[in-house]
Image (tube, grey):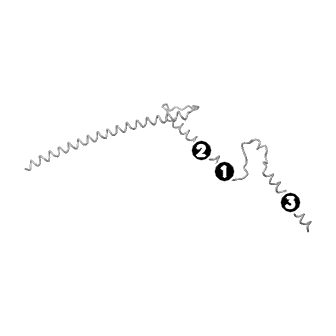
Amino acid sequence: MLKSELLFKDQVNDSLKNKLKYLSIEEEPSFPEDESRLGEQMILPKNYMQLFKDLVRTLNERTQELKDTKSKIEAIVVGAVMTKDNLVEYYEAFDAQDIAHRITNKLSVLQSENEALLNMVSYSNKQSLLIEMGLLKNENKILRDRLGKEEVGKS
């Protein structure tokens, strides 16, 4: 009986050793040349949660970089459109600060032009209202004169 128990425990130990070997082999990289090519840049995490967190962090960083790049490209396109000669060289280097400065200058010029046009329109509206008021006063005077003549004619 003891021999059978000893044999059984021996087999269980052997089986556990084999499983442990198999698991330790699985954890080692199967392609060492790939690891040397990647260098120390890539570290394989032990659990999936850490891998997921790293991927999310990397995704957020790339998304922010993409937003920054989009805003710079938008500024470049607006600056290229707002140039006086409308000629954009293919290999021309753009400075984002210079383009932003051009845009703000153009916006301030446009704002002052809009204010000038608004003043002109309001002056024009004022003049047209004064003319209309003068015409109405003149019409009122004519109607009063007629009314006065008719009252004099009736009496």
Please provide percent x and percent y for residue 9: 87, 63
Front: mark 2 or 3: 3
| Residue 73 % position (x, y) | 56, 39
Residue 128 placement, left or right of 57: left
* Mark drawn on residue 13: 3
Labels 1, 2: front one? 1
Q: Quadrant of the N terminus?
A: bottom right
Q: CA distance from mark 3 to mark 1?
A: 38 Å
* Residue under the image location 56 percent in, 31 percent down: 89
Neighbourhood count class around disc 2 (C-alpha, 10 Å): few under 14, some 14–19, many 20 upward? few
Residue 142, compared with residue 84, is above or below; it is: below
Q: Earlier in the sequence, mark 1 or mark 2?
A: 1
> In terms of depth relative to the viewer, which is nearer, 42 or 5?
5
Q: Give the residue type at disc 2.
A: Gln
Instruction: For mark 2, give the secondary structure.
Output: helix
Q: Splitting the image into 4 quarters, where does residue 6 fall?
A: bottom right
Where is mark 2, residue-wise?
64
Q: Which mark is residue 11?
A: none
On the rendered structure, is 81 left or right of 145?
A: right
Q: Which badge, 3 or 1, is on the more N-terminal residue? A: 3
Residue type, mark 1 in image: Lys
Tell me the residue at 55%/41% (across/down): 71
Is 136 placed left or right of 147 in the picture? right
- Residue drawn at point x = 79 percent, y = 45 percent: 32
Structural crowding at the residue carrying mark 1, measured as other residues with C-alpha within 10 Å and reported as few (<14), some (14–19) or many (≥20): few
Q: Is residue 46 left or right of residue 152?
A: right
- Please name the amino acid that badge 3 sits on: Asn
Element type where label 1 sits in the image: helix
First in sequence, mark 2 or 3: give its number. 3
How many angstroms separate mark 1 from mark 2 (CA)?
17 Å
Q: Which residue is mark 1?
A: 53
Position in image of residue 52 (x %, y %) = 67, 51
